[in-house]
Amino acid sequence: MSMQALNKLVARSIIDPGVVQAFSAGRIEDVITELDFSTELCDRLSHLEAESWAEYAILAYRYVKAAEEREVRIQLPSPLEGLLPDEKRAEDEQAA
Amino acid sequence: MANLDSVLRHAVTPPAFDQTKLNRERLVDIIHANIPRKLIVIATPAGYGKTTLLANFSDQTELPVCWVRITEADRDVMRFATILAVSLQRRFRRLVGKFDLERLSDSSPQALAHTLADIIDVNVSETFVIALDDVHIINRSKATTAFVDAFLDVLPEQVTVLAAGREVLEVSLAKLMAEGALAGLGPQDLALTRLELAELAEIQAGVELSRQDADRLLEETRGWITGVVLSGKLSSSGLSTLVQDPRPMVYEYLASVVLNRQPDDLRRFMLDSSVFPVMTAEGCDYLLKQEQSNRFLRRLVRGGMFVTATDDTPRTYEYHPQFRQFLLELLKSADRKRYRRYLVRAANYLADHGSPEHAVDLYSEAGAYSRAAALAEERAEEMHLSGRWITLESWSQRLEESKAVAPKVFLYLAASYTEQGNLEPAESSLQRSQEMLKPGAAKSIRAYTEILRGHIAYRRGQYDEVLEAADSAERLLGIRGSRQRKSNCCRLRALATLEKGDLQSAEAYAERAFELLDHPSLKSAQAYALIDLSNIQLDLGKSTEAHATSLKAHEILLEIGGPIKLAVSFNNMAYDAHLQGRYEEALELYNEGLKFARQAASPAREANILFSQADLFADLDLALQAAELYGQGLNIAARLDNLSLTRYGCIQTSILHRRRGGSVLAHEWLGRAMELEKRSDDPPAVTIQLSALEAMAKPDQAKNALSRLLRKEKRLDVSERTLTLYFMARAALSAGDLDQAQDVLEQTLDWSGGNGTEQFVAGELAFDSDFREFARLRLGSHPVLSVIFRRIETMRGIAQLYQETPEDADATVQLALFALGEASIHCQERRLSDLKPLAREVLFHLADHQRVERDVLLETFWPQHPPGRQVANLHTTVYNLRRELGRDVILHEGPVYCLNPELPIEYDVIRFERAASIAEGLPPGDPRKMFALTEAINSYGGPFLTEFASDWVMERRRDLEMRYLDLLAQHAQEALVRDQPLRAVNTLRQALQIDPYRDDTNLYFLEALGRLGRRSEVVSHYQRYIRLLADELGLDPPEPVRELYARLID
């Protein structure tokens, strides 16, 4: 749902220069509140700091994606555990 | 193209961009500047010149443009995909015959999109543009939107989609924006500038606007191009006619200026022809019963009467949508009868010329519902077979509203829903169809409704109802009924009886179902029948027959199957090959299966194949590869929250660890499998694996558990029964009961030989040397055991292809030469440190070149010496080497010197090059590639012979280092594909230490850092990199690196 709202925000920014103007004037909250974001996301997105509209869109996408990613119910270790030599295992742990 | 109907031809042909149109260079430039992006959106309300801009761009650009004009009919995703495919084929002749959309008729929109994108990627390497006009229509179709979204997601980088419409395309815009793959033009961009306005006035009216007039016009219209055109100023009627509102009174203008000023005959033509969504001269002649349409249409274009035309032959014409609407309303209000008559006549024409969708629309609009229903009924089966269920859905809604009777439309819609597993709408459509069917309706249709009822009941697990529906359908079909329908009934019976546990009857029904399908046009049904039969034969333990049957099905599917069916079929074939010991073939088939599973956008199927592939690697004792694949499969299964898939992956991972002696880990993985679904009794696979783990430490307990399983579980499948017997025998051996162990092992062998499950025994026995020895001693002459031992040998041979075994190799090595990293020479496991540098270099030269002409040696090592001295030096050096290494190490065959090929000589450069060749030979994405690359990278010990600086050494050092860097780059690429950016970073650091200038490694490094979210490292690395390039080479970073950096930082 939130990603759809973010897609709408990006769509609006294409057809309505007011969106980018609102962002530049520090009033993006006015636009955000019109869209269907959860209260928490609305708050976060309203207070995101970015130097350009493009950067704002990237950061917003990351936040919304993280918020939307389904909690994976099943948590499993890597089947490689116990098979890798120590050095490789350390690397994989770091990666994890 | 000559064979295409006018509507289709019009859809893929850009409108002509002639001198009467304003060339908007600044906008064309903006589009060009954004071409590397995946999607460029042009979204404005009507009248801003979107279509004209697309035509302008198509006319100006050097890039190939594939045009797609979207209509309401494209809300059916299959139609949209067809139009897109036609447009692509029209532009790229090499694509003709590549899009076999019929085989994709039951595919999801995502699978369709993946397939199209794959075909483009394989066949078209040049940059090109797909121009989509009127994309707002797509927004009202979930399926077509899903198609475009998936298409953009996997779009090859050489393609840009230019999408114009009144709304922004509702796809994953945020993701595209975050990837730097989106650009947009809105009304503010398309609004006319003063300069453009002046040019437009000049082109259209031949007038020169004063600055004051231009400003006023722009102010009042806000640059809205239609507003400007309709203002009258450009038609020389004076600025005073401008309206006060920014939007002029369009209809009044159209009536007073555009239509009423035309001669009567042309006005009449415009009104009557407007019933056609797309016009051709031939169509209009038919409609108007005259032969002058060509002349009228040309006059309309010349007069700028809101008509666009294509340049191809025969030309197609289209009124601007708003203008057509105006004409239609006028025609309707003036003479309703005439309006209806022309609608019906136009529908007749379109029905006969390949546009049934538009024809049904026009009949309905005319109120000719029975004609609409008749045409829809006539085309319903064809629509169903070509996957056009969305069209059927739209027809059903339209006809339902008009209370028209169209049972076949609802029936085939129900069939489409059933195939999709959409059971509730399937049932209600079927019910509606049955209500509409008259008592005297054809029996074959009534039988089909029963067959569909059976399929729905089967999917709901109501097997008695399935059999009852099959009975009822067969009664209706009688003796002379359709063989295809009868086959359908047999299939239903086979499926239901299989579920009810009567395997013999199920097999008989499945065989009959196939026999009845003896017509070549029934291939799809034949494949389904064969797949059913193969599954039943497998359950019956008839593995050879099952294999032959699935091979037949596979051959049919290769010809007609869509990606999901091909994924299943390749997986089945691979599994068969694995079970029959054709391991390398199985690996290839699994890879094909994976390709199709990904194309079908089916993660569950993908996980399934990954697990099967991992099982094969586990049997081959390639544990790392197996574990990697189990990991990938488990990630997908967990993401899907698919318990049965996850459980399977956990059990198989447990087996992998058990076989390698990791019993603690094996217990842990089995525990996870049990934890996923807590049941009072464990499923057979879990009991078998628990017993396998206990077979050594608690053999009696294991034996008892397995015996209970054999007694209780009537429905153990053949593989489970094989393993149950096998581990009972193993437990007996551990318990010291040798006779029982022999007896049960013999039963295992008999059973597996009779049921084609030798691989399950081979897979276990390969890891248990004690039991293998016992089997050899006690049952060495058993024919099945010989088969199993041969399998084990084959598996080892294949594993060696992918895995070096240095321990074994080193054991017999007489001479070992290490030239990578710290150079050293070992003879009979003794390091030689007394050899003179020149002798060492000659030895490495011989090892590296294998066979060297004497003259080459002389010129390489003693170029300055006189000939006599050269030869003497060579002899002395060879003599010294032979003294240290043994006389037979260096051979002298005529003028050629070489190291004795008969001797076991180890040379690390050859090992590295062999490993590199294996890695380089595997296609990107192949699960073996990552391991092969790791192997190759690990076998590079460092720079080649750093103690020497002669030309041949330097050249060889450079080449080897280059190859090593290539391997590192490929390794990083593979890691990025697998979403392992940290691994890629570690690899690339090694590469950058050697060559900090290389473009590809810097590009991947920045990308990997970006994916890890290490923005500050991205910045610092990039700064360092550009400084280095500027200072050392006086260069700027290449374009792709600059773009990537900009994207990461933005």
Image: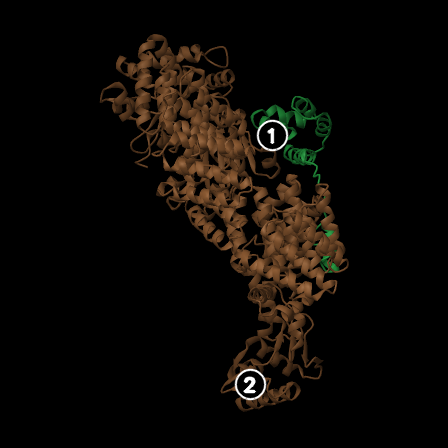
Chain colours: A green, B brown
As drawn, B901 above or below B157:
below
Along the line of sight, which residue is nearer the eye, B181 or B763?
B763
As drawn, B118 above or below A68:
below
List x then y, in percent, for residue B60: 41, 36
Along the line of sight, which residue is nearer the eye, B930 or B487?
B487
Residue type at mark 1 is Asn
Q: Is residue B144 left or right of residue A53?
A: left
Res. B138 visible in picture: yes
List x then y, in percent, for residue B460: 56, 32
Q: CA distance from mark 2 to mark 1?
A: 74 Å
Q: Residue at x 58, y 60 (%)?
A: B750
As drawn, B486 above or below B331:
below
Q: Chain of mark 2?
A: B
Q: Residue at x 27, y 13 (%)?
A: B263
Query: Which residue is under mark 1?
Result: A7
Residue type at mark 2 is Leu
Name the quadrant of the N terminus of chain B.
top left
Q: Residues within 10 Å of mark 1 (few under 14, many from 20)?
A: many
Image-quadrant location for residue B344: top left
Element carrying mark 1: helix
Q: Residues within 10 Å of mark 2 (few under 14, many from 20)?
A: some
As drawn, B190 above or below B631:
above
Element carrying mark 2: strand
Query: Which residue is under mark 2?
Result: B891
